[in-house]
Image (cartoon, rainbow, N blue to C red):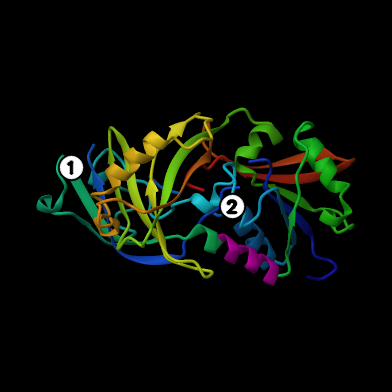
Amino acid sequence: MSESSKHVIVIGYAPYLKTFAVLDRVPILPCYLTEFYSAGVIGLQTAINLLQTKYDVTVIGEYMPGDTDVDYTSPWDSPSHPELTPNGIDSLWWRDIVSGFAPLPTSSLPPNVGAGIYFSSFTVNPPVYIEYLRSQVLALGGRVQRLVLPVSGGLLGALSALLQNKEATLAKGVHAFVNATGMGARTLVPDERVFPTRGQTLVVRGVADRARTRVGDWGISYVIPRSGGLGEEGSTILGGCKEARNWNKNVDDAFSKVIMERCKVLAPELLNGKGEFEVLSSQVGFRPSREGGPRVELEEVIVENQKIPVVHSYGHAGAG
């Protein structure tokens, strides 16, 4: 970066980052509809876009790729395909965008399933992808710094602390901030419209031969293959649930059993000789949701007697 480049700080996580995106290709993906699911590179991808536009960028966050914490949902994401709808196949706005879209024959549907579709799509191994994104930020000349922001003074207090941090600001000032803090925006901004949509998943041994989703008035079930990477063996995510405003960070063992039972019909190829999945981990994560939808807007704030633009980008729930 040249000395004249404008410096932007991307706040990718503040005591709550949710990152995921495309990586692995998979075969035809059936999605069963009985009476419906989805997932956003925000902080790191924003940094990459800014770097490619010749800005000087520093990404800061409490959690980083490789970390695991209930508030850092990136490693447990299961992104794969667009949101479905309970209003029938004809109402799917993306049906003409994906490849190979077609209804499933009625004879191929499981019991009590009213309709189904299949199409070619992709799945993601989030730990591999977010590490790739960080490597791209560094390769483009950006910086990634672990830093915990104070939230007691709200957004202005946090930004003031940042401006006083000569390591974060490179001792040459800041042109703009990007607020991509996910759940952290609830206390950092503060924005009381931000709330968690709780999800619970399991990682099981083996790679499912395709991604499958089944949705009904009882909830959602899905299996999302995650090919191996960074020396890891492949695995599959089983899910799940969408529980708005549920702040429980603990794994519900009883519901884990429900997830496995529902997913057996979706990935029988992963069952062992006893007809069970081999569970590698179980986890809970909070999708950063927001009443009224995501906040994506520009705000100018006065910090340390400076007028600085803040670009807000949070509240995307499971569709970041």
Residue drawn at point x = 56 percent, y = 39 percent: 315
Q: Which residue is mark 1?
A: 113
Circle 2 packing at 10 Å, graded few (<14), some (14-19), many (20+), is many
**What's the amino acid at mark 1?**
Val
Q: CA distance from mark 2 to mark 1?
A: 36 Å
Q: Which residues are magenta?
A: 130-139
Residue 152 in percent (x, y) is at 77, 31
Q: Is residue 308 among what the camera can see?
A: yes
Q: Is residue 43 above or below residue 185?
A: below
Nearer mark to the viewer, of 2 and 1: 1
**Circle 2 — which element?**
loop
Quadrant where the N terminus sits is: bottom right
The prevailing secondary structure element of the residues shown in magenta is: helix
Residue 73 in percent (x, y) is at 54, 47
Please state if 20 lies on the left or on the right of 48 as rendered. Answer: left
- Label 2 vs 1, first from the N-terminus: 2
Q: Is residue 48 above or below residue 89?
A: below
Residue drawn at point x = 79 percent, y = 60 percent: 6
Depth check, front residue: 147 or 67: 67
Please state if 146 lies on the left or on the right of 108 as rendered. Answer: right
Q: Which residue is mark 2?
A: 42
Residue 138 highlighted magenta (yes or no): yes
Residue 266 highlighted magenta (yes or no): no
Disc tally is 2
Circle 1 packing at 10 Å, graded few (<14), some (14-19), many (20+), is some
Residue 82 in percent (x, y) is at 38, 51
**What's the amino acid at mark 2?**
Ile
Quarter of the image where one finds residue 189: top right
**Circle 1 — which element?**
loop
Depth check, front residue: 61 or 289: 61
* Callouts 2 and 1 close, C-beta under 8 Å: no
